[in-house]
């Protein structure tokens, strides 16, 4: 088996006495899309922020495409990208200006061609010279995804990437991300509260509860394995009765 694009070992992030993330160990394989699920406050954003190097872990190890984040930070981050609604692009720059600046920061080769490619892939041609600040939230999400694909990342981190999209655009974006994973060069770590979407997109899910991984498996078969009819029912059980699931697993 080829080396995973992400390997997280015993990751902990503590704030004083409480742990936002407490001993997470998981991997994302090349070509795989992994859903990071869990109730509000379970530790999803903290996990993503530590993998992005924005938050320093209290302990544990993060390896991106063979590069240890603590020891080879710039190499690890050069293989990573992300999109999240809470990290909008500068609103006073146009779509093209934003992509150019990020492309220069990433050192993207043949940048003008790559900008044309991501603009076409995310259907952004008509907004090319529009300032990002005046775009609708769904349009801004597509620009953020275009930025996230610019450097052809090995690891794509997406924090609720379709939260502000209408159903048709969300379907297009899911297809685009599936295509990214199917190409087999990279993997995706995806957080979402939309269980329909998770079932459609993710090869595997990790259910976080109180800073730990409570359940892990195929989103299409995991509910039945725990006596639930749907992934949403399983999610509700994780949120309300995590101890009963822990005992059963
Ligand atoms: N800087 C901080 N100081 C103290 N506690 C924090 C800090 N950041 C996060 N936490 C706590 O860590 C826990 C995990 O937060 P996190 O944002 O990772 O959850 P989440 O799963 O992303 O939640 P949501 O679904 O609501 O976005 C929460 O209880 C939160 O209050």
Image: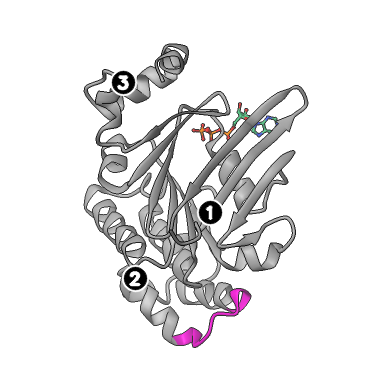
- Residue 57, horizontal then vertical, whole percent: 71, 42
Q: Residues within 10 Å of mark 3 (few under 14, many from 20)?
A: some
Mark 2 touches mark 1? (CB < 8 Å): no
Beta carbon of the mark 2 residue lies under 8 A of ligand 1? no
Most foreground residue, 113 or 140: 113
Q: Is residue 86 left or right of residue 139?
A: right
The image quarter containing residue 145 is bottom left
Mark positioned earlier in the residue sequence (3 or 2): 2
The quarter of the picture where the C terminus appears is top left
Which secondary structure, mark 3?
Answer: loop
Residue 55 within the segment the image draws in magenta: no
Which residue corresponds to mark 3? 226
The residue pinned by badge 2 equals 124
133 left or right of 105? left
Q: Is residue 126 at least partly visible in the picture?
A: no
Query: What secondary structure is marked by label 2?
Result: loop
> Range of the magenta residues?
104-112
Distance from label 2 to label 1 (Cα)? 30 Å
* Residue wearing tag 1: 6
Instruction: Mark 3 vs mark 2: give the one in front.
Output: 3
Q: Badge 1: few (under 14), some or many (20 or more) residues near its Cα, within 10 Å?
A: many
Q: CA distance from mark 3 to mark 1?
A: 27 Å
Query: What colouring style does the render use?
Result: one colour
The residue positioned farthest toward the front in the image shown: 1
The residue drawn where x is 42% and y is 86% is 113
């Amino acid at each position: 088996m080829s080396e995973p694009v992400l390997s997280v070992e015993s990751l902990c992030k503590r704030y004083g006495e409480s742990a936002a993330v407490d001993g997470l160990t998981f991997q994302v394989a090349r070509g795989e899309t992994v859903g990071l699920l869990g109730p509000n406050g379970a530790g999803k954003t903290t996990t993503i922020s530590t993998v992005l190097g924005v938050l320093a872990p209290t302990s544990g190890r993060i390896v991106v495409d063979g590069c240890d984040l603590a020891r080879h930070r710039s190499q690890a981050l050069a293989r990573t990208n992300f999109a999240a609604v809470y990290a909008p692009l500068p609103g006073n720059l146009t779509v093209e200006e934003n992509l150019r600046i990020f492309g220069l920061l990433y050192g993207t080769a043949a940048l003008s061609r790559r900008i044309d490619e991501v603009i076409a892939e995310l259907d952004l041609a008509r907004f090319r010279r529009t300032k990002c600040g005046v775009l609708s939230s769904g349009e801004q999400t597509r620009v953020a995804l275009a930025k996230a694909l610019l450097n052809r990342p090995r690891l794509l981190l997406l924090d609720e990437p379709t939260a502000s999209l209408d159903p048709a655009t969300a379907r297009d974006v899911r297809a685009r991300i599936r295509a990214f994973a199917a190409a087999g060069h990279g993997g995706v770590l995806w957080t979402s509260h939309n269980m329909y979407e998770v079932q459609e997109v993710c090869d595997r899910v990790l259910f976080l509860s109180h800073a730990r991984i409570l359940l892990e498996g195929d989103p299409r078969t995991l509910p039945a394995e725990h006596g639930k009819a749907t992934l949403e029912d399983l999610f509700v059980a994780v949120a309300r009765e995590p101890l009963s699931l822990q005992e059963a697993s």
